């Protein structure tokens, strides 16, 4: 059996985060390891949980948040 994909969810607003969590909840191959409501807390959560995947909100369509570059430098895997 393969290990589940470990996902940290950091979407805003809360209703979007809850919708995503509901969508992922019945997938046996996914393990939601946490949820973050404040962008400032994302780096700490990533450091502590080391997710396989981080799902976060995009403020400007087509533009990657600056936080992504910082996280990718610290966690290139």
Image (cartoon, rainbow, N blue to C red):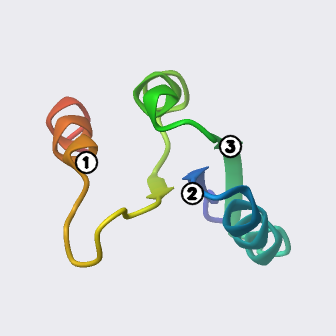
Query: What residue do we see at 16% from left, 45% from top?
Result: 69
Q: Judging from the image, what secondary structure is the residue with disc 1 in? A: helix
Residue under numbered circle 2: 11
Q: Is residue 37 left or right of residue 59?
A: right
Residue at 21 percent across and 29 percent down: it is: 74
Q: Which residue is mark 1?
A: 68
Picture coordinates of residue 56, whole percent (x, y): 47, 57
**Residue 7 on image: x %, y %:** 58, 54
Rendered-image quadrant of the N terminus: bottom right
Give the label, 3 or 2, closer to the camera.
2
Marks 3 and 2, how far apart at CA: 14 Å
Earlier-in-chain disc, 1 versus 2 = 2
How many other residues sit within 10 Å of disc 2, few (<14), some (14-19) or many (≥20)?
many
Q: Quadrant of residue 26?
A: bottom right
| Left or right: residue 51 compared with residue 23 | left
Q: Which mark is residue 33?
A: 3
Q: Secondary structure at mark 3?
A: strand
Among the two numbered marks 3 and 1 on one chain, the one whose residue lies closer to the N terminus: 3
């Amino acid at each position: 059996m393969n290990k589940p994909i470990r996902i940290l969810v950091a979407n805003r607003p809360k209703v979007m985060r809850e919708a995503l969590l509901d969508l992922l909840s019945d997938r046996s191959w996914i393990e939601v390891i946490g949820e973050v409501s404040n962008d400032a807390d994302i780096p700490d959560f990533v450091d502590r949980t080391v997710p396989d995947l981080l799902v976060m909100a995009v403020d400007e369509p087509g533009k990657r948040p600056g936080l992504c570059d910082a996280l990718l430098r610290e966690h290139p895997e």
